[in-house]
């Protein structure tokens, strides 16, 4: 009925519009109301009563947590070792509440591995719901150390593990030092030392490094259950020092002898290393006139002094034979090595000699022969290093060092099979890293 009335009203308005101007104005004013009336029309059969709402409350039975609790049920937890951690602090983070177990392990000689914690590794503990220690596992080196609780107390065992070898790649940029750069790149000190050794005949890491120098490295890593256990050999490396690029790849021949070579097969190792120390600073250079701090007089200084903490390892700069190992005047504890026929190197002020160093023993380049000290005429711990040719002093930082033999013609195919993939890895990593920095 309401809808019929609306239709009639609309028809009347149309007639009014067609009759006169005043009617058109009235129609325009009335149209919104006609629309409103039409818009509020209700379809036939629509239910307009409000639905009945009722509140229902139902009791839900909860499980008996007290009955489900089992104090003997065990759980495994794992924590990563941080710098400064002790076994006690790690067990606290592992939610171990068992002073008796801690005291027992502390008194067991077999459990000493649990007190030689290496940051970055993980340690796992199996505990009961109330914090009693059931088992403890720690991976150190290639061995898994386990402490298991039994009827008679704890037993500690050591078992070798199978390691998974992976090849990893990383890069970094020198901001202050090589060690700081490798730390920032999450590389171990073992890798950093190898990088320094590989390029030590071309780069003096005491004085040649510059901010902005870059390196890329391909190296071995060994894993157990997804956790890195240790790093291995550097397989390839690139170092950009003051704009000059140095590259090296490791190659081992059929006889089992290995070394580092440039990508075109030249031996990167010179007959002599530039420095007998891995990292230190030059405290006194090669000169004909230097004021001696002990003798209080001017005299020639025919060697290089490297300041380093007492006990720092000293390396043989070349293959050779020990000509002298003992105490000699102002040198204090001294080692003299003879290389080939006319070359000798002198290492003075040592605090001690490495095991097996005596007259007539043979050493290889890079072998540790002694340790930095302050014996003889020395005001503090440092190494006095001399390089002589036919017993004539030479400046070891300026003398031209002969190179070791390159890859032979018959080894070239095998070398290329190793070098080319490594060159591609270095190029890929270099390009990826530059894109990321930009």
Image (cartoon, grey):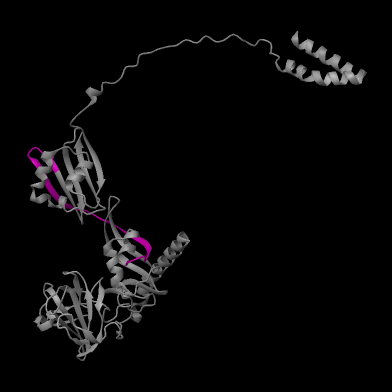
* Image location of residue 85, percent across then percent down: 21, 49
Residue at image position (20%, 45%) is 89
Residue at image position (30%, 62%) is 220
* Image location of residue 235, percent across then percent down: 33, 67
Q: Quadrant of the N terminus?
A: top right
Compare residues 24 and 261 and report the one nearer the observer: 24
Residue at image position (17%, 54%) is 116
Residue 172, visible in the rendered structure: yes
* Image location of residue 324, percent across then percent down: 11, 83
User: Farthest residue in the right direction?
Assistant: 19
Residue at image position (10%, 39%) is 100
The magenta-colored residue range is: 148-177
- Prevailing secondary structure class for the magenta stretch in the rendered image: strand
Displayed quadrant of residue 343: bottom left
Displayed quadrant of residue 375: bottom left
* Residue 172 among magenta residues: yes
Compare residues 356 and 241 and report the one nearer the observer: 241
Residue 256, visible in the rendered structure: no
């Amino acid at each position: 009925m309401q809808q019929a009335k609306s239709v009639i009203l609309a028809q009347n308005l149309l007639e009014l519009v067609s009759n006169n101007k005043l009617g058109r104005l009235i129609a325009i004013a009335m149209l919104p109301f006609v629309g409103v009336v039409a818009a509020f029309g209700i379809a036939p059969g629509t239910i307009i009563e409000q639905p009945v709402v009722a509140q229902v409350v139902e009791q839900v039975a909860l499980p008996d947590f007290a009955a489900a609790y089992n104090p003997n049920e065990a759980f495994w937890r794992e924590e990563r070792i941080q710098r400064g951690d002790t076994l006690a602090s790690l067990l606290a983070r592992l939610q171990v509440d068992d002073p008796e177990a801690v005291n027992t392990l502390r008194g067991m000689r077999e459990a000493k591995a649990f007190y030689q914690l290496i940051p970055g590794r993980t340690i796992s503990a199996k505990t009961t719901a109330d914090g009693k220690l059931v088992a403890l596992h720690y991976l150190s080196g290639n061995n898994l150390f386990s402490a298991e609780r039994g009827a008679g107390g704890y037993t500690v065992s050591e078992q070798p593990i199978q390691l998974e070898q992976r090849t990893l790649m990383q890069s970094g940029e020198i901001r202050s030092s090589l060690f700081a750069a490798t730390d920032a790149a999450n590389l171990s000190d073992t890798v950093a030392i190898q990088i320094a050794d590989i390029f030590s005949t071309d780069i003096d890491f005491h004085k040649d490094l510059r901010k902005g120098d870059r390196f890329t490295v391909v190296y071995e890593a060994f894993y157990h259950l997804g956790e890195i256990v240790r790093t291995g050999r550097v397989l390839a490396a690139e170092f950009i020092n003051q704009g000059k690029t140095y590259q090296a790849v490791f190659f081992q021949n059929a006889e089992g002898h290995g070394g580092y070579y440039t990508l075109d097969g030249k031996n990167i190792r010179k007959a002599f290393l530039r420095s007998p120390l891995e990292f230190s600073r030059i405290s006194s250079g090669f000169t004909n006139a230097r004021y001696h701090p002990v003798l209080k007089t001017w005299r020639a200084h025919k060697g290089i002094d490297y300041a380093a903490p007492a006990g720092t390892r000293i390396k043989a700069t070349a293959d050779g034979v020990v000509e002298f190992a003992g105490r000699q005047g102002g040198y204090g504890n001294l080692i003299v090595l003879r290389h080939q026929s006319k070359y000798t190197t002198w290492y003075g002020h040592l605090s001690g000699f490495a095991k097996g160093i005596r007259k007539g023993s043979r050493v290889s380049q890079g072998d540790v022969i002694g340790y930095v000290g302050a014996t003889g005429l020395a005001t503090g711990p440092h190494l006095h290093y001399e390089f002589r040719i036919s017993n004539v002093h030479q400046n070891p930082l300026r003398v031209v060092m002969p190179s070791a033999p390159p890859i032979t013609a018959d080894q070239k195919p095998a070398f290329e099979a190793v070098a080319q993939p490594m060159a591609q890895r270095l190029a890929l990593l270099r390009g990826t890293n530059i894109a990321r920095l930009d």
